[in-house]
Amino acid sequence: MDNNTALYAFRKYGDTVLRAAYACCGNYSEAEDITQDVFLILHSNPQDFESDEHMKAWLLRAAINKCKNYKKSFRVSRTDNIDDVSENQLKCNFTLRDSEIRENISKLPQKYSSVIFLYYFEGYSIREIAEMLGKNENTVNSRLQRGRKKLKIELEREGYNETNTVY
């Protein structure tokens, strides 16, 4: 591709990257900033991708890495989150139930939330997630299992049970 790679990628995967960033960091404004940063990096340093799926994987990996950095930042660790959740959830096209589940996913440790997001929200297989994250398939599988268990515990605390929620 030429110098329009970032524009093409944004048009095709902008919403996906935004949803991934939001699911990982739990703050819509920061998710927008992270998304912008990811596409700015791609614009400044164009990459050669083997396919659109390779491009999507690169964008998601970059967004997840940015989210990790965001969660480690002084601003997050030393300040309270003042986020207008209801408005932001509507912008991401989550239903009320999805937004509550997504909120609980974002509270999980990063290693679990990113795997759950990629598996359930983006439809990647364990093998694809392992390649994307540079991890062993068994590691991804165990993180997925542990993340599900942690998510189930949190959802049960909030009154969900197996009859009204899919884990």
Image (spheres, rainbow, N blue to C red):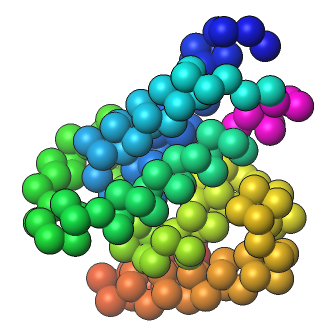
Residue 160 is drawn in which quadrant? bottom left
Residue name at image x 41 percent, y 60 percent:
69
Q: Position of residue 159 (x, y in %)?
A: 32, 84
The answer to whether residue 94 is magenta is no
Q: Position of residue 152 (x, y in %)?
A: 49, 85
Q: Position of residue 128 (x, y in %)?
A: 82, 58
Above/below status of 87 relative to 139: above
Left or right of 79? Residue 22 is: right
Above/below status of 63 relative to 76: above
Residue 76 is drawn in which quadrant? bottom left
The answer to whether residue 51 is magenta is yes
Viewer-nearest residue: 124 or 155: 124
Location of the C terminus by quadrant is: bottom right
Q: Where does the magenta region start and end?
A: 49-56
Viewer-nearest residue: 91 or 95: 91
Left or right of 125? Residue 26 is: left
- Secondary structure mostly taken by the magenta-highlighted segment of the chain: helix
Residue name at image x 11 percent, y 66 percent:
80
Location of the N terminus by quadrant is: top right
Residue name at image x 40 percent, y 66 percent:
106
